[in-house]
Image (cartoon, rainbow, N blue to C red):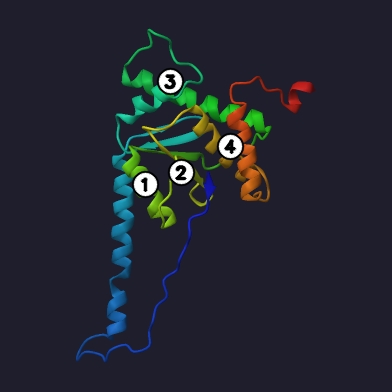
Amino acid sequence: MSANPARRIPSVKRQGEKENSPGGPPIGRRRWLGLPSAILILTLAFAADAIAQPQLESAYARLMFSNPEDIATLNKSIDFGESGGWFASSDPAAVEKRLRGKIDALYDKAQRILDMRKPMRPKVLLRVLHDENERATTFFKIFKRNGQARAWYVYEFNTVYINAQDVNEGIIAHEFAHAIIDHYLSVRPPRASAEILATYVDKYLFDDVRTRNDFQ
C-alpha cells in the first residue's frame, strides 16, 4: 500500500483578540511567545524517541524498531536470502547481520524484477512496529482515520511501515517496490499503476529474473 498522509495547516485567527493587559504585551503576541519553545520541546522529544529505539542500517535501508526483541522476530519472519541454516548462531550480532543481508536481498530482488536500479538518497526507512496495537495507532496518526493495511509506504517520509508480528518477505518486497518506483521515475505514477507493479514484485519474488543487462 502506498499513500499520502493528509496535511492540514492550522489557521491563525487574529480578529477579536482581547485587549492588552496593563503593562504586558498584547494577548495575541503573548500567545505566540511560547511557540518556539514548544517546537523545540517537540523536536527534542522526537529525537530522544528515535535515539532510544534500536536501529540497524544495511546497504539499501535503515531499520528502526520499537522493541529490541523484534530484531530476532523480524529475522525469523523473512524466508529469503541467507538464513544460516539449522546451526545459525543466535548471537545478537549474528542475527543482526543476517537480517541486514535479508533486507538487502529483498530490496535488490525488487529492483531486478522492476528493472529499476538507482541509488536512493537518503535510504528508505523500514519502521518496524511492535504489534497490531502500534500498527493501528501509527496508521491513525498518519492518515487521521482507521485502516486495516498490514503494511504501507509513505513517500513524503520515505518510510515503509510494517508490523513485526504480521509480516513476511512478500509484504516487505511489495512496499520496497513502492519506494523504488516512486524514486526511480521522474514523475510518480498513478497509485493504481504503482500498485500493479508492486504486486508484480510480490508475485515473482522467488522466480529467476533476467533484466535488460542480462541480454547485452
In the displayed image of the protein, which residue is found farthest to the top? 87
Instruction: Determine if residue 35 is in view.
Output: yes
Nearer the N terminus, badge 4 or badge 3? Answer: 3
Q: Residues within 10 Å of mark 2 (few under 14, many from 20)?
A: few
Q: Which residue is mark 3?
A: 98
Callout in the foreground (3, 1): 1
Q: Residues within 10 Å of mark 4 (few under 14, many from 20)?
A: many
Q: Residues within 10 Å of mark 1 (few under 14, many from 20)?
A: some
Q: Which residue is mark 1?
A: 136
Q: Which residue is mark 4?
A: 177
Instruction: Determine if residue 159 is in view.
Output: no
Q: Dividing the image into 4 quarters, which one contains the C terminus?
A: top right
How far across and down, in percent of the image, does residue 134 sit? 33, 43
Identify which residue is drawn at 79% across, 22% down.
215
Residue at mark 2 to residue at mark 3: CA–CA distance: 27 Å
Q: Which residue is mark 2?
A: 149
Is 20 drawn above or below residue 45 in the view shown? below
Q: Say which element carries label 4.
A: helix
Q: Say which element carries label 3.
A: helix
Identify which residue is drawn at 42% across, 75% down.
11
Identify which residue is drawn at 63% across, 21% down.
207
How far across and down, in percent of the image, does residue 74 sit? 39, 28
Q: Say which element carries label 2.
A: loop
Q: What amino acid is labelled 3 in the image?
A: Arg
Residue at mark 1 to residue at mark 4: CA–CA distance: 23 Å
Q: Residues within 10 Å of mark 3 (few under 14, many from 20)?
A: many
Q: What amino acid is labelled 2 in the image?
A: Ala
Callout in the foreground (1, 4): 1
Nearer the N terminus, badge 1 or badge 4? Answer: 1
| Circle on res. 104 | none
Residue at mark 2 to residue at mark 1: CA–CA distance: 9 Å
Residue at mark 4 to residue at mark 3: CA–CA distance: 21 Å
